[in-house]
Image (spheres, rainbow, N blue to C red):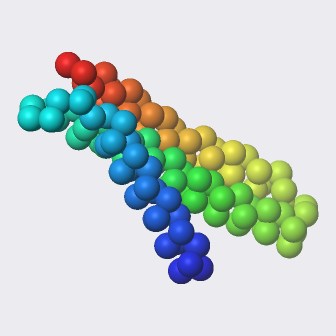
Amino acid sequence: MKNKIFSLLTIFGTFLIATAAFAADGKAGGSSNYAWFAIAAAIAIGLPAFGGAMGQGRAASAALEGIARNPGASGKIFVPMILGMALIESLVLFGLLMAFILSGNIGK
């Protein structure tokens, strides 16, 4: 489990560094904050997407385990699971909205 988390954090860190590199404006002596907006936009979509995926995976796993143990309760489990998935996804969409707002500041 630790190895998977370390791998995911390494990949996430690599994407952060790549985002800053692609956001460079090419001015060697100028002081620009465009790279910080790009990094903030990457974090604004990366963290909610990662957390939402983890949350949805756990919610689906728990719901399917409950249905497997008691198939008669599938109707009572399914609707709250879908509602929980929608609420988790709404938080990811707020992160996407923030990423769009931050990426609008790049280049201004």
Residue 5 against residue 86 in the figure, above or below: below
Specify whether 101 is left or right of 71: left
How many numbered discs sit on the rendered protein? 0
Q: Residue 45 appears at what percent x and percent y?
A: 43, 41
Give the residue displayed 53% in from the left and 80% down from the top: 2
Q: Is residue 7 above or below residue 83?
A: below
| Towards the viewer: 16 or 87 | 16
Relative horizontal placement of residue 62, taking residue 36 as reference (left or right): right
Q: Residue at x 36, y 51 (%)?
A: 17
| Image quadrant where one finds the N terminus | bottom right
**Furthest-right residue in view?**
71
Please provide percent x and percent y for residue 44: 37, 42
Q: Residue furthest front?
A: 28
The answer to whether residue 1 is left or right of residue 81 is left
Which residue does the image show at 56% across and 42% down from the upper left?
89
| Residue sitting farthest toward the top | 108
Q: Nearer the viewer, residue 106 or 65?
A: 106
Where is residue 10 drawn, in percent x and y?
46, 64
Residue drawn at point x = 78 percent, y = 67 percent: 66
Residue 41 seen from this side: no
The x and y percentages for residue 61 are 72, 64
Q: Nearer the viewer, residue 51 or 8?
A: 8
Q: Say if residue 89 shows up in the picture.
A: yes
Q: Is residue 94 left or right of residue 49?
A: left
Quarter containing the C terminus: top left
